[in-house]
Image (spheres, rainbow, N blue to C red):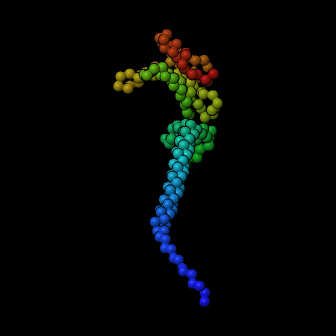
Amino acid sequence: MMDKQPIIETANNFDAVNEHIDNLAIRQRDLLNFQRLSKFRNLVISVAILLIALSVAYFIYSYATRLPTLSPIGEVSSIDDVLSRAKGDRRSDTSMDADSAANKVSVDFTVFTTIKLGDDKDIVTGWRYNPSNLEVPNREYCYYNLTVADNKQEVINLAEKNQGEAIVWAANLSSEMQRAGEENCRFYK
């Protein structure tokens, strides 16, 4: 028979090591999830900032490319709309009698330039355009605008000019008003 060798059995308990490894795995998974959430949060914040910047840029661009004016029927429209109407690109109004001179509508518009001389003083120049000639104003005028008590305004006419004519200065202007007008009224060429 064979010699029987004694069998030696060793019992080891690795429960504490296994628990530690499991805890490390859970901690590593939590850390990875936190990093993913942090990256996602940063991405959302970046996209939000980009959208806000694009919105502000669009607002500035759209505001700068339109000049609000009052159209003949009282609607606020852009300067391009007014120019196209002035050149004759209008929809026909069937309620108007075409033969009646009293019902004809003239589309003129005025461009104002304001120069501030102080908190309560302005000099305003107006260029009035006729639809038949949108290149050169047909009438120009300049006035002194003074804000007095209770935000009431006093207007003093300084000068006017019709197309192709010389500037006509208002009579009885003080030398100070005349000088202010000559320096600040912005007549077309």
x%, y% of residue 81? Answer: 58, 41
Location of residue 10 with respect to 60 vertically, above or below: below
x%, y% of residue 153? Answer: 41, 24
Determine whether, in the image, residue 152 is placed left or right of residue 15. left
x%, y% of residue 154? Answer: 42, 22
Location of residue 103 with respect to 2 vertically, above or below: above
Location of residue 58 with respect to 11 vertically, above or below: above
Outermost residue, left direction?
Answer: 150
Asked if residue 139 can be seen in this view, the reply is yes
Residue positioned 63% across, 22% down in the render: 189
Q: Residue 163 or 34: which is nearer the viewer?
A: 34
Residue positioned 50% across, 18% down in the render: 158
Outermost residue, top direction?
Answer: 175
Location of residue 143 with respect to 39 vertically, above or below: above
Task: Say which quarter of the image contains residue 165.
Answer: top right
Q: Residue 123 or 168: which is nearer the viewer?
A: 123
Q: How many marks?
A: 0
Residue positioned 57% across, 81% down in the render: 5
| Quarter of the figure that contains the N terminus | bottom right
Residue positioned 50% across, 56% down in the render: 31
Determine whether, in the image, residue 164 is placed left or right of residue 68. right
Determine whether, in the image, residue 30 is placed left or right of residue 80. left
Q: Residue 27 or 103: which is nearer the viewer?
A: 27
Asked if residue 78 can be seen in this view, the reply is no
Q: Residue 152 or 89: which is nearer the viewer?
A: 152
